[in-house]
Image (cartoon, rainbow, N blue to C red):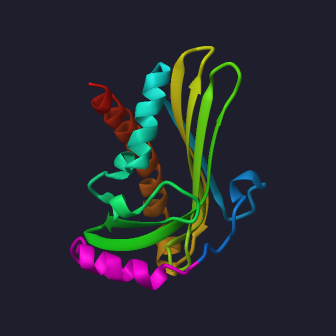
Amino acid sequence: MLTFRCPSDERVEAYARRVSGASSVDGPGLLDRERPIGWFRDRVGSLLGTGEGTYVLARTALERWEPLDLGWYRVRRRSATPLERGALVVSSVRVLGLWFTWACRISSVVESADSSGSRRLLVTWAPVRGHAVRGEESFGLEYDASTDEVRAEIRAVSRPARWYVWLGLPVARSMQHTFKSEVLAAWAHSTRRRGA
């Protein structure tokens, strides 16, 4: 959906209803496959802090979609979008003064702990049909009990799904890199704010 202003909640709800049955184009597991020609692979991470309490705060921030509220990128319908497999995540993105609204579907949410006390959360989503890109993206969170560190990581494999994204590929790739670095910074900020 393309608009000249950030779309109203009513328009976003109508869009969500329209794409509610849509599936992703590429299916799950793309992140774990070898990268085919024409696909881009990204992996970035950062230290969010220390202590198991920080892990809990960072997990809560992600459950509420706080790291993905960047101003120019906004997860919509946040209270209606649980962090669970099958949930439809609708986002509005400002690009060159225009607002695009697209959706991704959460393909998996895996949380684990081991006997050492380390904990991990991995949330993976994929764009649904009609999105500007194809691929898969994951948001990982890990508490390492041996170092007491909490780290976040974003992994993605993607390629344009629309002719205009291919045409503006340098801008699209720049925005993807900016998105990932800003999400990590916002994740650290929202985690610290929750712990204050």
Residue 11, how many percent across, how many down?
A: 28, 80
Please report the residue visible at 32 percent of the width from the left and 37 percent of the height from the top.
190
Magenta residue check for 53: no
Q: Is residue 130 above or below residue 141?
A: below
Looking at this view, name the residue that lies furthest to the right: 34
Q: Is residue 110 above or below residue 81?
A: above
Residue bounds of the magenta highlight: 1-22
Q: Is residue 48 above or below residue 155?
A: above
Q: Quadrant of the N terminus?
A: bottom left
Occupied quadrant, residue 114: top right
Residue 162, how many percent across, how many down?
A: 52, 78
In the picture, measured across the screen, residue 178 lies left or right of residue 109, that is left
Please report the residue visible at 30 percent of the width from the left and 67 percent of the height from the top.
96
Occupied quadrant, residue 194: top left
Please report the residue visible at 78 percent of the width from the left and 54 percent of the height from the top.
34
Please report the residue visible at 30 percent of the width from the left and 72 percent of the height from the top.
99
Residue 20, how many percent across, how many down?
A: 49, 79
Q: Quadrant of the C terminus?
A: top left
Residue 144, how many percent across, how many down?
A: 60, 22
Magenta residue check for 10: yes
Residue 163 or residue 12, whichever sits in front: 12
Residue 143 seen anywhere in this rendered image of the structure:
yes
